[in-house]
Amino acid sequence: MPKEISVVVLAATVAGLATMMVSPAMGASGTATFYTPPYTPSACFGNTAEGTMIAAASEVFWDGGAACGDRYVVRCTGATNQGVPHPCTGRSVTVKIVDLCPAGCRGTIDLSQEAFAAIADPDAGKINIEYNRV
């Protein structure tokens, strides 16, 4: 293989690896709210309980129900209001999409009360987040 082609192939490989290493760490931004039990019935699983680390997707990624069963890692990045200026716990949570956030949904994702409390002070009500599909 000529030297010039080898350099191009190597550069493309390194660029591809760099993209793979950066992509998972970079998430989409949005907001999260929470809802309280009961968590059934749900749009995805009917009356089957799916635990408490669950969420309802907004139209941002619901995709006509295609999001059902998808898992997302969600991390609080800050407050959306002055009520609780530092709501984040510093942890992230993995949730399963089980429902559609109802019309007028105030967040990108509506977490179960338990999932929200794992990443933020529930008194905040609504937080800024970063989320990744896993």
Image: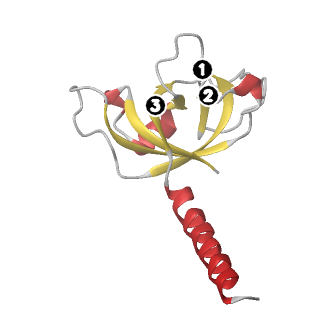
Q: Whole-percent x and y of residue 11? A: 59, 76
Measured in 3D between alpha carbons, the distance from the residue under mark 2 to the one under mark 1, in whole angstroms, is 5 Å
Q: Residue at x 22, y 25 (%)?
A: 83
Measured in 3D between alpha carbons, the distance from the residue under mark 3 to the one under mark 2, in whole angstroms, is 10 Å
Q: Whole-percent x and y of residue 94? A: 57, 48
User: Relative to 23, does residue 123 appear above or below in the rendering?
Assistant: above
Q: Residue at x 62, y 82 (%)?
A: 7
Query: Residue type at mark 2?
Result: Ala
Q: Earlier in the sequence, mark 1 or mark 3?
A: 3
Q: Whole-percent x and y of residue 118? A: 44, 44
Disc sitting over residue 32 in the figure: 3
Q: Whole-percent x and y of residue 46? A: 78, 23
Dot 2: element: strand
Measured in 3D between alpha carbons, the distance from the residue under mark 1 to the one under mark 3, in whole angstroms, is 11 Å
Observer-nearest residue: 81 or 36?
81
Quick one: label 2, few (<14), some, or many (20+) residues within 10 Å?
many
User: Relative to 19, does residue 42 appear above or below in the rendering?
Assistant: above
Disc sitting over residue 7 in the figure: none
Quick one: label 3, few (<14), some, or many (20+) residues within 10 Å?
many
Residue that numbered label 2 is attached to = 57
Q: Residue at x 59, y 32 (%)?
A: 55
Which corner quadrant of the image does residue 71 belong to?
A: top right
Residue that numbered label 1 is attached to = 101
- As drawn, is 25 to the left or to the right of 47? left
Cβ–Cβ under 8 Å for marks 2 and 1: yes
Which corner quadrant of the image does residue 86 belong to?
A: top left
Q: Earlier in the sequence, mark 3 or mark 2?
A: 3
Dot 1: element: loop
